[in-house]
Amino acid sequence: MPRAARRQWPHSPQRAGGESAVTPYRQRCHRLLCGETLAGTPVTAGGYLMDWKTVRGSLHHVAENEIFWLVGYAVLTGSIVAKGIAWLFYAETVTSAAVLELWTMTFSNDIVFSIWLVFGIARNAFSPMMAKLMVALIMVGLLCNWIMAYAVTYRYFGIIDSEKEARDSITCLYFSIVTWTTLGYGDVRPSLDARLIAASEALIGYIWMAAFIGLLAELLRQLAREITSGSPNHVE
């Protein structure tokens, strides 16, 4: 093969046009991290194209993908509920560490996904209908997490059933649901240590019920308006 037709490898001193093919190590690392190219050729590492702009664009697209976040939220919420069920029904005793861990997981999960949803709505990343639907789904997940967390807390502190202290799982879950919905049958009441906890659940449940019913009514109203207008994408 003639010398002129030989392929210019990266270790050769010169490339076509007199351009140096030997690049200092630090400059190569800098360009690799910045997603730049060497002599017009995409930077590669291990044979794979290192296009960081494409990677960043893909991550940004994933961050604004509501399906990805909803699936992640459902998985995390389900794992928290499953852990609460395990502590409530299958653990012999509930410790303060278990209660603290469950509440930490519940708060972390709800705060992270609530912040993501607020930023998504503020940036108009979702349609109005999808945004309201995601808020409703997150509120349902919050309902499951908090009722289970309160039930485990009642099992730790104890409640009063028929003038006797009770810590059985069914009674604690029953009292948590009744307190959240503010029904107040009066057959079961909180112990002295659990009074403030029951009061907080009743307050949060009252606010949650009002917000969820209002959101559900708005969803149904918007759905009826879209059906009437004959355009699924029509938003006033």
Image (tube, rainbow, N blue to C red):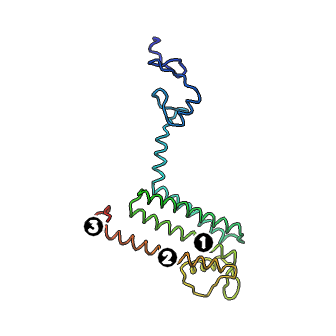
Q: Nearer the viewer, residue 208 or 231?
A: 208
Do callouts 3 and 1 mark residues in contact (Cβ within 8 Å)? no
Q: CA distance from mark 1 to mark 2?
A: 17 Å
Q: Which mark is residue 209?
A: 2
Q: Residue at x 30, y 68 (%)?
A: 227
- What is the x, y in percent for residue 170? 62, 78
- Residue type at mark 3 is Ser
In this rendering, which labeled residue sits more in front, label 3 or label 1? Answer: 3
Q: Please report whichever mark, 1 or 2, sits nearer to the chain's N-terminal start.
A: 1
Do callouts 3 and 2 mark residues in contact (Cβ within 8 Å)? no
Residue denoted by label 3: 229
- Residue type at mark 1 is Met
Q: CA distance from mark 3 to mark 1?
A: 42 Å
The single residue placed furthest to the top in the displayed view is: 2
- Residue type at mark 2 is Met
Residue denoted by label 1: 148
Residue 33 picture quarter:
top right
Residue 65 picture quarter:
bottom left
Q: CA distance from mark 3 to mark 2?
A: 30 Å
Q: Residue at x 57, y 32 (%)?
A: 29
- What is the x, y in percent for residue 85? 62, 69
Q: Please report whichever mark, 3 or 2, sits nearer to the chain's N-terminal start.
A: 2
Regarding mark 3 in the picture, which secondary structure is present there? Answer: helix
Q: Residue at x 62, y 68 (%)?
A: 84
Q: Nearer the viewer, residue 183 or 16?
A: 16
Q: Is residue 161 above or below residue 224?
A: below
Give the crowd class for mark 2: few <14, some 14-19, many >=20 residues within 10 Å: some
Regarding mark 1 in the picture, which secondary structure is present there? Answer: helix
Q: Which mark is residue 2?
A: none
Q: Please report whichever mark, 3 or 1, sits nearer to the chain's N-terminal start.
A: 1
